[in-house]
Image (spheres, grey):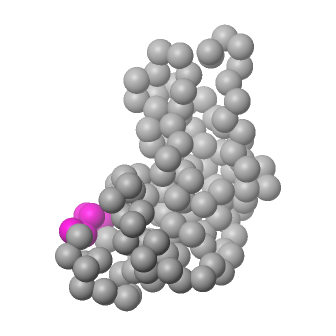
Amino acid sequence: MRLITHNMLSCNIKGVSNGFPLIIEAAKVIEKEVDFNPDFLKHMFAKIEWKALVDGARSMGYAELPEDSPDATVLDSGDELFLRKLHHALLEIHLEEGALVCPETGRKFPVNKGIPNMLLHEDEV
């Protein structure tokens, strides 16, 4: 599971009001090279919850992103170093094995072979 996916997932258990961002418990992290596409990154930047991305990246061992979200001028300036770090975090780091944990309930959703199982139990619907 890529961090771009993690940034869009939340806990949907009935009654949960604070189900985002899910906490990553990484057991196995892998890196897969992906073609660099600065236009895609510029488009996705506005959709990303920055703090969730930084926390997720750090929990998977990647601490190269700045703590505070850069403004859009960084993207417009074509800062390739920043764009490559963002690219690596969003698209090349994969949670292969581990769990996503609801911040409110502590419910763990397993991640196996890079696929998060977000299915709810009958009493959680």
Horizontal side of residue 37 vs 31, given as left or right: left
**Residue, far right:** 113
Q: Main secondary structure of the magenta part?
A: loop
Residue at x 45% of width, y 43% of height: 21
Please identify the quadrant where the C terminus is shown.
top right
Classify 75 as above or below 78: above
Instruction: Give x and y (percent) for residue 34.
Output: 63, 79
**Residue, far top:** 123
Horizontal side of residue 115 vs 17, given as left or right: right
Classify 35 as above or below 99: below
The residue lying toward the viewer, choosing from 87 and 65, is: 87
**Can residue 61 be seen in the rendering of this structure?**
no
Residue at x 49% of width, y 75% of height: 87
Instruction: Give x and y (percent) for residue 11.
Output: 53, 32
Residue at x 23% of width, y 70% of height: 72
Classify 28 as above or below 75: above
Magenta residues, start to end: 67-71
* Residue 69 highlighted magenta (yes or no): yes
The residue lying toward the viewer, choosing from 65 and 83, is: 83
Q: Quadrant of residue 101?
A: top right
